[in-house]
Image (cartoon, rainbow, N blue to C red):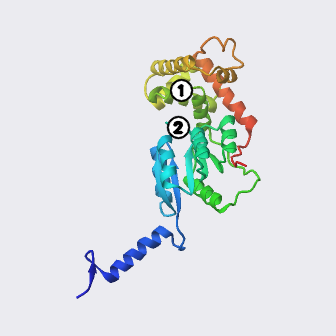
């Protein structure tokens, strides 16, 4: 009669235990590094976790306060940090980590790479910054590089963000409310204008946006106008003056749809051309 443990034969039990142990330690006999994924996007968290589950011991969280508690309890070796976390944003969380003496290797991700954020992540010891949307395999590769210490003082050149990212960055910087329908209409209007500048707004652009986002031209116009007025009411004057520097009375008068779309599209193109290649290695 075979001896069993928990209903499993000793021989098979030992094989199963060895398998589980080796899985946790990694196939090279090394303890897996602990990874904390702190990102507001559930989809991005899930994709990262699935892709990296065999390489790291992973804990995930969706907001800054939760991430700070996880840093204390989980004590990760490396962290993927969304700089636009709700609750405590990425910059504030990095400051709290520094004060608390928590120093995991940090790979930051963001949809909005402003000069302020670039300065902050460099000052607060972030190892690498990636602009969303980004390829999961690239994130995995950068994590591995960071942990192996492959990065040097030399700046690493990466491909600039695509136009979708640049448009999103502009809308967030201008504090456009993220109402699902209106935000999508305005975003699509800017993308179409960037693809084909100079097209007629009422006769061509609005119907095209309506076809893509749903609704007729009048509904698109009203949705966009409502968002612009809401953003104007809570605007950062320095930011708006930068985007609408060439627009008369921009500092005292809310721009109409046509003026807004044209000015923001022109700013995105000029800024993109002036910046050239993005550099995201910190150090």
Q: Which mark is residue 186?
A: 1
Q: Are marks 2 and 1 in contact (CB under 8 Å)?
A: no
- The correct choice, above or below, for 164 with respect to 34 in the image is above
Residue shown at 42% from the left, 76% from the top? 18
Disc 1 is placed on an element classified as helix
Point out the image quarter for the N terminus. Answer: bottom left
Q: CA distance from mark 2 to mark 1?
A: 28 Å
- The correct choice, above or below, for 188 with respect to 36 in the image is above
Residue 30 seen anywhere in this rendered image of the structure: yes
Q: Position of residue 46 (x, y in %)?
A: 45, 51
Which picture quadrant has residue 241? top right
Q: Residues within 10 Å of mark 2 (few under 14, many from 20)?
A: some
Q: Earlier in the sequence, mark 2 or mark 1?
A: 2
Disc 2 is placed on an element classified as loop
For the image, the number of numbered tags is: 2
The residue sitting at the right extreme is 154
Q: Position of residue 160 (x, y in %)?
A: 67, 43
Q: Nearer the viewer, residue 259 or 46?
A: 46
Q: Residues within 10 Å of mark 1 (few under 14, many from 20)?
A: many
Q: Which mark is residue 118?
A: none
Task: Write down the residue under mark 2.
Answer: 88
């Amino acid at each position: 009669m075979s001896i069993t443990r928990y209903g499993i034969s000793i021989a098979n039990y030992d094989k199963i235990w060895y398998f589980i142990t080796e899985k946790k330690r990694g196939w090279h006999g090394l303890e897996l590094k602990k990874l904390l994924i702190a990102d507001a996007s559930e989809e991005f968290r899930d994709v990262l976790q699935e892709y990296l589950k065999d390489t790291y011991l992973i804990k995930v969280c969706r907001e800054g306060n939760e991430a700070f508690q996880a840093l204390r309890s989980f004590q990760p070796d490396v962290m993927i940090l969304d700089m636009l976390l709700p609750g405590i944003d990425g910059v504030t969380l990095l400051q709290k980590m520094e004060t608390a003496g928590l120093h995991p290797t940090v790979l930051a991700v963001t949809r909005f790479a402003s000069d302020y954020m670039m300065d902050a992540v460099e000052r607060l010891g972030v190892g690498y910054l990636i602009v969303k949307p980004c390829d999961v395999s690239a994130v995995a590769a950068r994590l591995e590089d960071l942990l192996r210490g492959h990065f040097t003082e030399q700046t690493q050149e990466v491909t600039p963000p695509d136009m979708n990212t640049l448009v999103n960055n502009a809308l967030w910087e201008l504090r456009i409310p993220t109402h699902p329908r209106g935000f999508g209409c305005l975003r699509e209007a800017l993308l179409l204008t960037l693809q084909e500048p100079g097209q007629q707004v009422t006769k061509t652009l609005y119907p095209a946006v309506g076809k893509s986002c749903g609704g007729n031209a009048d509904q698109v116009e009203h949705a966009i106008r409502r968002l612009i007025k809401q953003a104007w009411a809570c605007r950062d004057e320095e930011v708006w003056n930068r985007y609408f520097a060439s627009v008369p009375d921009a500092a005292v008068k809310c721009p109409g749809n046509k003026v807004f779309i044209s000015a923001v599209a022109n700013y995105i193109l000029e800024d993109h051309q002036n910046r050239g290649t993005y550099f995201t290695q910190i150090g």
